[in-house]
Image: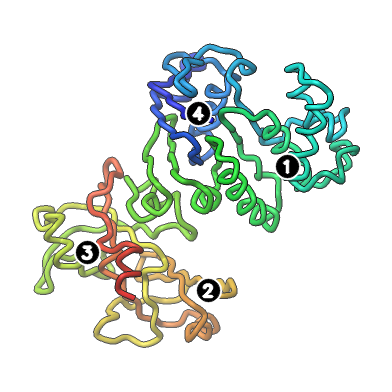
């Protein structure tokens, strides 16, 4: 096992900069995700750590050893590729054993190690089959087993679950998380799926346009996003974002969205000195779960909206609402609200929870003011 240190890592392909000055520090045994949209540089970063791509600039250390320009076989890393990378002319046993064979392990040691890891990954009964005879879930297990058998200092995974169906992905998320903690090997996992990152990672590194935007534990990424990009990329359905202007009324500081105004929490507005932003444009954000939905207006639900779309999902319902030309989504329990979906273009009333409002700079997207509440606040109040 080993830690990982990446300093000012740069990769250029001609005039194009795929990775532009990335710094990463991963502790021994940590499970860290590189998360971002396609083309953000996360896979290129992983390939440089693996030695499959040489960096244009920068330094890579694994366990304190400089491996920046070493070939992959000299780095002692194990890797699972997006397409599994299995040799189709070999049996499952042969695929798992291959990393040991090229390192000259004896046949007896090879047999013991392959059988042990096959039992761990629950594929001992398919060792004599070839990849073409296996289902997608089994192929993934074989690829992971081949990585595990090396007893590497560092495990690297490049979207290994992208070819699995939703049910299998759910099962494998739990298995991989349990396996990584059981073995304790430092692991870097690349994904564009925020659900994978949120449910499995110790920490998440969010990337965009070849650079790191934020590094934090999953809950902090969700509740304390560094900018509008992170706020909307993490969370499903994504955070509602709307243009607003900070202004004042007899109620205090408000965000004027146009068709309606959102009162801001007094202490929160004061703590963030929002009064000095009076008259300035902002981008207001609120997650669907923090918009309260009612069928009739009252003093605490002052925004009148019209139902535009209704999406039942089982335990919850999604409602796409419109207030003037502003559209937003709310997510509510089916209890007491399922009937709303049957009302064509129903008139509703909503309230934005003032403790879960976010404000972003309209120019560069950075977070101006975070939500006043956190999950810890909610738990302590319960």
User: Quarter holding the N terminus?
Assistant: top right
| Mark 2 residue element | strand
Q: CA distance from mark 4 to mark 2?
A: 43 Å
Q: Earlier in the sequence, mark 1 or mark 4?
A: 4
The residue positioned 25% from the left and 47% from the top of the image is 361
Q: Are marks 4 and 2 in contact (CB under 8 Å)?
A: no
Q: Of tags 3 and 2, which is closer to the observer?
A: 2
Q: CA distance from mark 3 to mark 2?
A: 29 Å
Residue 379 image offset from top left, x and y in percent: 35, 69
* Residue hosting label 2: 316
* Residue hosting label 4: 2
Residue 279 image offset from top left, x and y in percent: 13, 55
Color theme of the render: rainbow
Q: Of tags 3 and 4, which is closer to the observer?
A: 4
Q: Earlier in the sequence, mark 3 or mark 1?
A: 1
Residue 358: quarter of image: bottom left
Eyeballing the image, is 255 above or below 381? above
Q: CA distance from mark 3 to mark 4?
A: 52 Å
Q: Earlier in the sequence, mark 4 or mark 2?
A: 4
Q: Are marks 2 and 1 in contact (CB under 8 Å)?
A: no
Check disc 1: other Cα within 10 Å, few if <14, some if 14-19, many if 20+.
many
Residue 75: quarter of image: top right
Residue 72 image offset from top left, x and y in percent: 62, 18
Q: CA distance from mark 1 to mark 4?
A: 25 Å
Eyeballing the image, is 65 above or below 222? above
* Residue hosting label 3: 256
Eyeballing the image, is 88 above or below 229? above
The residue positioned 39% from the left and 22% from the top of the image is 7
């Amino acid at each position: 096992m080993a830690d990982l240190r990446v300093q000012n890592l740069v990769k250029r392909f001609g005039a194009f900069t795929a990775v532009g000055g990335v710094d990463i520090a991963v502790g021994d045994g940590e499970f860290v995700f590189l998360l971002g949209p396609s083309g953000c540089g996360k896979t290129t970063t992983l390939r440089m750590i693996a030695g499959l791509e040489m960096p244009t600039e920068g330094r890579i250390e694994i366990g304190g050893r400089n491996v920046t320009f070493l070939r992959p076989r000299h780095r002692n890393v194990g890797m699972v590729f997006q397409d599994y990378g299995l040799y189709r002319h070999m049996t499952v046993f042969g695929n798992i054993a291959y990393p040991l064979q090229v390192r000259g392990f004896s046949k007896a040691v090879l047999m013991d190690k392959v059988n042990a890891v096959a039992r761990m990954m629950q594929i001992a009964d398919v060792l004599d089959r070839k990849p073409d005879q296996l289902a997608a879930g089994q192929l993934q297990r074989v690829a992971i087993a081949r990585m595990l058998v090396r007893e590497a200092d560092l495990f690297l995974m490049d979207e290994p679950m992208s070819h699995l169906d939703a049910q299998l992905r759910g099962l494998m998320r739990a298995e991989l998380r349990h396996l990584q903690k059981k073995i304790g090997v430092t692991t870097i996992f690349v994904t564009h799926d925020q659900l994978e990152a949120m449910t499995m990672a110790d920490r998440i590194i969010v990337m965009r346009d070849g650079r790191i935007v934020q590094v934090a534990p999953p809950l902090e990424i969700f509740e304390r996003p560094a900018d509008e990009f992170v706020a909307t990329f993490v969370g499903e359905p994504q955070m509602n974002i709307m243009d607003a202007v900070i202004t004042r009324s007899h109620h205090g500081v408000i965000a004027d969205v146009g068709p309606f105004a959102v009162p801001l929490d007094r202490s929160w507005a004061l703590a963030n000195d929002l009064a000095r932003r009076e008259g300035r444009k902002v981008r207001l954000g609120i997650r669907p779960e923090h918009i309260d939905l009612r069928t009739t207006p009252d003093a605490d639900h002052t925004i009148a909206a019209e139902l535009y779309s209704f999406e039942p999902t089982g335990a919850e319902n999604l409602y796409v609402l419109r207030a003037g030309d502003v559209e937003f989504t709310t997510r509510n329990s089916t209890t007491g609200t399922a009937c709303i979906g049957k009302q064509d273009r129903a008139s509703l009333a909503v309230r934005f929870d003032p403790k879960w409002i976010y404000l972003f700079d309209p120019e560069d997207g950075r977070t101006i003011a975070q939500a006043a509440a956190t999950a810890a606040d909610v738990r302590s109040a319960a």
